[in-house]
């Protein structure tokens, strides 16, 4: 089986985790936590970074740090992993769904303003599958209406716009370190931000809202959203390899592109000028007469021992978020799939995947 994803674990990661375990600092206190936060803030070009248990709670924590709750609205793209909208719903606020651009798969900035109401408090753009959203336009809109920007950068570590890392454009950026992400801590996530007071509030809420001066005294409801020192040790090792990891993902995209890009019935990840895509997952979309056979291709690949994934379902199609149709996300979602994209994949394995796809198209 050629899997869709698997982590790259080297001796460096094993040694750092062993250090954490043998030190006795196995919970949320320990030197690797602080080191990981410091390194990550520097990498993203932000003043602060806050480790959390996973990307989803990171989104929730970011929203709660701004007191977003019942009666408020948060604008999110219709095509994203469900955690984006779920985190909004956890607060009691309402996610307002906006269609996407077909080129980038990110929120369509031309449709944001029509979704803004007196109850809108934030915009939560998602850098989907590793391509940055149009943060310049989103910032302009947010400033115009006095809105907070919380970047869902879960899938986009290493992606940039004009040389600036995603996650650093909004008020808060949120990353995920799940096992299939650019770097992993098993489960885990990170907030990045520049505001000192907001940093203090987010850290307080993350740690049960316990007073920093009066132990076991709590003046508000908080959460246990902390990362362990063991996870942070893995994260430090992975972050030390980030350039190597990103370079390999660009190589993987080039391998797929060389084999598939000339086929008129296939498109691969598109990248707008001035943007750097981190290629979290290689995306292809089937066009023309093949646009309706995506699921059949997934089954064909499975029979050839090749794992793949369909694009996310539009949020507007899910029972708990059922709403008006977003036509672009509906069309794109039904014809797109993700191909094996992991550090240790070989060019020969990419050959197998690409040839299997081309064989399927020739038979269909």
Image (tube, rainbow, N blue to C red):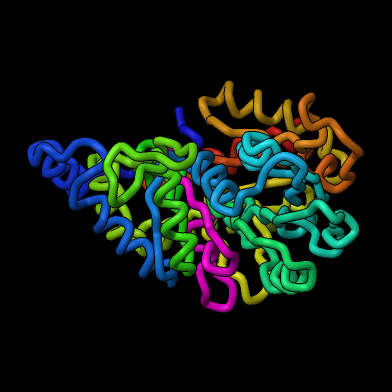
Dominant secondary structure of the residues highlighted in magenta in the image: loop
Q: Residue furthest toward the left?
A: 22
Q: Tell me where residue 219 appears, x and y as whole percent.
A: 44, 42
Can I make out residue 251 in this image?
Answer: no
In the rendered structure, which segment of residues is drawn in magenta?
A: 155-179
Residue at 61 percent across and 71 percent down: it is: 275
- Which quadrant holds the N terminus? top left
Residue 213 rendering spot, x and y as whole percentages: 28, 51
Residue at position x 58%, y 33% in the image: 308
- Viewer-proximal residue among 308 and 256: 308
**Is residue 305 rendered to the left or right of residue 115?**
left
The C terminus sits in image quarter:
top right
Residue sticking out furthest to the top: 303
- Judge whether 137 appears above or below 77 on screen: below
Please state if 285 lies on the left or on the right of 205 as rendered: right
Q: Nearer the viewer, residue 152 or 240?
A: 152
Residue at (36% x, 61% y) in the render: 40
């Amino acid at each position: 089986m050629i899997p869709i994803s698997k982590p790259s674990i080297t001796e460096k990661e094993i040694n750092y985790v062993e250090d954490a375990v043998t030190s006795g600092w196995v919970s949320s206190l320990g030197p690797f936590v602080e080191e990981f936060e410091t390194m990550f803030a520097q990498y993203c070009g932000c003043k602060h970074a806050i480790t959390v248990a996973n990307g989803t709670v990171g989104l929730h924590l970011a929203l709660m740090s701004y007191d977003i709750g019942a009666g408020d609205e948060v604008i999110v793209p219709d095509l994203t992993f469900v955690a984006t909208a779920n985190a909004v719903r956890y607060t009691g606020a309402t996610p307002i769904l906006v269609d996407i651009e077909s080129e980038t798969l990110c929120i369509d900035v031309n449709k944001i303003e029509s979704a803004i109401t007196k109850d809108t408090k934030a915009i939560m753009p998602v850098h989907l599958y590793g391509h940055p959203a149009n943060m310049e336009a989103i910032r302009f809109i947010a400033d115009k209406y006095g809105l907070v920007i919380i970047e869902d950068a879960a899938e986009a570590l290493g992606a940039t716009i004009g040389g600036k890392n995603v996650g650093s454009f909004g008020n808060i950026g949120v990353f995920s370190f799940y096992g299939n992400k650019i770097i992993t801590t098993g489960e885990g996530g990170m907030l990045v931000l520049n505001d000192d007071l907001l940093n203090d509030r987010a850290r307080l809420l993350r740690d049960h809202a316990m007073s920093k001066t009066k132990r076991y005294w709590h003046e508000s409801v908080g959460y246990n959203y902390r990362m362990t020192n063991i996870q942070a040790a893995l994260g430090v090792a992975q972050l030390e390899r980030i350039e190597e990891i990103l370079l390999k993902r660009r190589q993987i995209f080039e391998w797929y592109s060389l084999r598939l890009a000339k086929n008129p019935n296939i498109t691969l990840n598109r990248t707008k000028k001035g943007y750097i895509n981190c290629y979290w997952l290689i995306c292809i979309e089937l066009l023309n007469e093949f646009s309706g056979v995506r699921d059949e291709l997934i089954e064909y690949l499975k029979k050839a021992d090749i794992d793949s994934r369909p694009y996310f379902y539009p949020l507007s199609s899910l029972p708990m978020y059922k709403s008006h149709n977003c036509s672009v996300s509906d069309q794109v979602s039904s014809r797109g799939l993700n191909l094996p994209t992991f550090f240790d994949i070989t060019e020969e394995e990419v050959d197998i995947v690409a040839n299997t796809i081309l064989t399927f198209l020739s038979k269909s």
